[in-house]
Amino acid sequence: MLFRPSSRKQLMTTTLEFNESMSVQEIWQVVYRSLERTLATNMVHVWVQPLEAKSIEQSAAGARVVLEASNEFAAQWIRDKYLKKIEETFEQTLGKQTIVDISVSEKPKTVPTNDRVASVIATEADLPSTPSSGLVLQAGSRAATTPPLSSSVDARYTFDNFVVGASNQFAYASCVAVAEKPGGHYNPLFLYGSPGLGKTHLLNAIGSFVLRNNPNCRVCSISAEQFVNELIESIQHKKMTQFRSKYRESYDVILIDDIQFIAGKQTSEEEFFHTFNALYHSGRQIVVTSDRPPKEINNLEERVRTRFEWGLIADIQPPEIETRIAILRAKAERDDIYLPDDVATFLASSIRTNVRELEGVLTSLKAQSSLTGLEISLEMTKQLLKMNLAVDSSQISVESIQNAVVKFFDLKLADLKSTSRAQSVALPRQIAMYLIRKYTSLGYKEIGRYFGGKDHTTIMHACSKIEKGLEENSEIAKAVEGVQNLL
Ligand code: ADP
Ligand code: MG
C-alpha cells in the first residue's frame, strides 16, 4: 500500500464502494473507512492504520486476506483485539465469509525514505485527474515575451530540508508531483494541517524546486492576507485592472498560503474566485494551504469551496515521534548544534504537535549553551522546559494517567493494577508507569504502590523499556502519544 489510508481517502471520491475489479489495497481502503466509523479513532489510527493489505484470494464461497503489521507486537495486538471486527467488516464489504491473517513485515519500519515517496509519485496513474489535465503547463514558455517577475518564494524552504515521515509523506509526495509538473494532474493542490506542521515550508519548496528547474518560470508565492491587502489597495487607488492582470495573467504558478484568511471577506472571495477560474482554465498551477480542510472553512462561499475540491487535497498530520527526532537531528546538524540522543528523545516526546515549537526549543538550547559555555544536556533541557512541564504536570495525577491508559487500551482499572503478565495488560501498565514517572514527582518506589505494591525495580524496568520502545518501536511510540493526548 503506497498511501496511508487516511491520505488515500482524500484521493478517492467520497462515494467509494466495493466493486469486483478492485485490488486488495482498494478493498482495504473501503474496509478501513468503515472501521474508522465503528472503532474508537485513537485505536484505528494507532493500530489499524499502519496495516498494509498484501493479498486476497477469493472464491464463490469465501475470501482470505493477508494484512501485514510492522512488528510481532502490533500483529498480536490486532489479532487479540480487532481481528473479529476486521473480518466482519470484510464480510459485509465482500458479501462473503472472510478469513483475515495478520502477518508480520520482515523489514523493520523506519521513517520512509525519499525513494519510497518517489514511488508514490511514480504511481500518478493511480490518481484521478482533474478536468484540466489535458493542459500541461509549459512552465516559462511565455518568458520570451514577458520577463520573469520577481517572485517572493522563500528559498530557505526546500524539499531537501523537509523531513519525511508517515504523517507528511502524502503531502510531500503531492507537492513534489506538482513541482515536477506544474499545471499537470493535480490542480489545484489544497494542502491543510494544523499550525507549525510544514505547510508554508512545502508551499515554498514547490516554488524553489520549480524555479531551480526552470528559472524563467513565473512563480508567485503570497499569503492570502497579502492578496487581500493588495486587493484593498488596488480598489482604493483604482488599480483593479493592474491587479487583475497581475494575478490572472502574469504567473505560471501561484502559491497562496493560509487561504482560510479570505473566508467571509466577500470581495476577496469574489476576486479570488475569478482569479482562480482564469488561472485554472489556462492550465496554470494553483496551490493553496489552509489550517483546515475546505469543508471546515466557515463562511467560505460554496463555489470557492467547490473549486478547491476539484483537485487534490492533501493533509499533514502531526509527525510521529521518529519523525520528530529526525527533524531535530536534521536541524541540529544544519545549525551545527551538538544534540545528545537523550535530549533529542526527551524533546521529541515532550513537544508533540508543533514542529515550530520543537525548533524553537532547539534554538533556545543553542543560545543557552553558548551563553553558559556548557554543552547541551538533558538537565539543561529539562530546566528549559520546566515552566511548560510544571503547568502540565500540576494537572496530571497518577489517577488521570491510569484512567487515560485504561481508556486508550480499552481495559479495566483493576486489570491495570493486577499482577497479570498478559502482554495486553503488561504493556499498558508499563506505559502508565513510564508516564507517571515522567509527569509526576513520584519516585519508583512510590509508583510501585499505585500498582498493587510492585517492587521499584519493576517500575525502573518498565520506564527503560518504554523509553527504548519510544525510539525503536513505532507502535509503542504511538500508544504513548495516544495516551498523552488523553491527559
Ligand atoms: P505551517 O505553515 O504549517 O504553520 P511551517 O511550514 O511554517 O508550518 O513550519 C514551521 C517550521 O517547522 C518551519 O521552520 C519548517 O521549516 C519546520 N518544519 C515543519 N515540518 C518540517 C519537516 N517535516 N521537516 C523539516 N522542517 C519542518
Ligand atoms: Mg504557515
Image: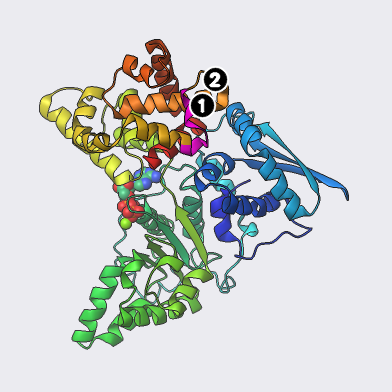
Task: Please name the residue shown 37% across and 78% down the image.
Answer: 272
Disc on res. 241? none
Mark 1 falls on what kind of element?
A: helix
Disc on res. 415? 1
Mark 2 falls on what kind of element?
A: loop
What amino acid does circle 1 point to? Asp
Residue range (magenta): 407-417
Where does the image place residue 464, in percent across and percent down from the top left?
A: 41, 18
Task: Say left or right for 7 vs 486.
Answer: right
Binning the other alpha carbons within 10 Å of mark 1 as few (below 14), some (14 to 19) or many (20 upward) gives some
What amino acid does circle 2 point to? Ser
Q: Height in image: 417 above or below 178? A: above
Instruction: Say if residue 282 shows up in the picture.
Output: no
Q: Is residue 413 magenta?
A: yes
Q: Is the magenta stretch mostly helix, strand or loop?
A: helix
Looking at the image, the residue that sits furthest to the right is 60
Task: Please name the residue shown 50% across and 57% down the image.
Answer: 180
Ligand 2 location (quadrant): bottom left
Binning the other alpha carbons within 10 Å of mark 2 as few (below 14), some (14 to 19) or many (20 upward) gives few
Q: Which residue carries the number 2 mark?
A: 420
Where does the image place residue 414, in percent across and percent down from the top left?
A: 49, 27
Where does the image place residue 220, in percent across and percent down from the top left?
A: 34, 67
Compute the Cα span from label 1 to label 2.
7 Å
- Of 217 and 115, the residue lying toward us: 115
